[in-house]
Image (spheres, helix red, strand yellow):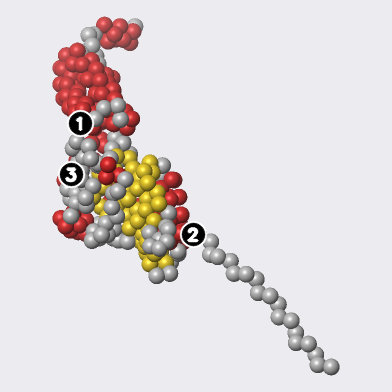
Amino acid sequence: MPRRRFLTSYQTDPISGLASWARRLAVFAAVAALGSIIIVRFGFLDVKPALATFFGALALAVLSILIGLAAFVAIWRTGSRGMSRIVLALAIDLVILAYPAYLGLQYRKLPKIHDITTDPIDPPRFESLARLRAGDGANSAVYAGLYSAEQQQATWPDIEPVELEVPVQRAYEVAVALVQKRKWLVIDERPPQPPRRIARIEAVARTPIMGFREDVSIRIAPDGEGSKIDIRSSSRYFESDLGSNAARVTKLIEDINAAVDKAPAAKKPPATAKQPPAKKK
């Protein structure tokens, strides 16, 4: 049978060594990338060795792509097997490189700042969080300053204080509920107390993939009969946050406004029926 002879001939063709190496490198890159993510998220090692591992995984993924392309040329010329290994390697490599490529575009497009706040003049302070930012290589707990404020205003002009027509206690409860919903690690929480009745929340958020720590401070203060909420979000490491803090502050502002708008209005007590005046006898 011609078809059987063709299959037998195909099965006896040698497998391309380059294709095998492309697959091996892709699998190893995936394991290294996943390992670096676990190291950062669970704090097994410092950030620097974890990042070195992650960038090494990216380099291996790029090398795997190059070897895979060379394997494709070799298979095209010699007729050896291994195309499925090349396809698998390229698929793994693209999964590994897709998100870093997106972050690279963000790095080129967005300003190189890491500290975002609704009040650049008097930003919410990091008090309890300041101790956690005292480590080697960590960004200062002091606000980044005028340059950061100008870059923020130029890129995200809509980030402003949240002014609410609800008492400060209600605004504080809304903020606490949203922080808990996001599963941020609360470091300090102070409800409004007289005489100033200013509430504070300090918490630690994590970036979606690598889980880098980004610190959040929320200040809730009375504003006439209503209240005002100021938010600050700052990366603990790196000069550029790739827009993560601005996205966090913007989303929190939207959720605070939505939560207050959806809150049921206080019910007025039912009006008592007026008794008719007594008739004079």
Residue at mark 1: 48
Q: Which badge, 1 or 3, is on the more N-terminal residue?
A: 1
Q: Assign a secondary structure to mark 3.
A: loop
Picture quarter with the C terminus: bottom right
Residue at mark 2: 262
In the displayed structure, 233 sits above or below 59; it is below
Q: Is 277 left, or right, of 25 in this rendering?
A: right
Decide which of 52, 46 is in the foreground and name it. Answer: 46
Determine crowd level at label 2: few under 14, some 14-19, many 20+ residues with C-alpha closer than 10 A.
few
Residue type, numbered disc 1 = Lys
Residue sitting at x 58%, y 66%: 267
Picture quarter with the N terminus: top left
Q: Which badge, 2 or 3, is on the more N-terminal residue?
A: 3
Residue sitting at x 25%, y 20%: 28
Q: Rounded to the nearest whole Å, what is the CA distance between mark 1 and mark 3? A: 14 Å
Residue type, numbered disc 3 = Glu
Decide which of 5, 46 is in the foreground and name it. Answer: 46
Residue at mark 3: 239
Residue 177: x and y, percent?
45, 50
Q: Assign a secondary structure to mark 1.
A: helix
Quadrant of the image occupied by residue 59: top left
Residue sitting at x 27%, y 56%: 123
Residue sitting at x 22%, y 37%: 135
Q: Nearer the viewer, mark 1 or mark 2?
A: 1
- State if disc 3 and disc 1 touch (CB < 8 Å): no
Q: Which badge, 1 or 2, is on the more N-terminal residue?
A: 1
In the displayed structure, 23 sits above or below 139; it is above
Decide which of 24, 156 is in the foreground and name it. Answer: 156
Q: Is residue 239 visible?
A: yes
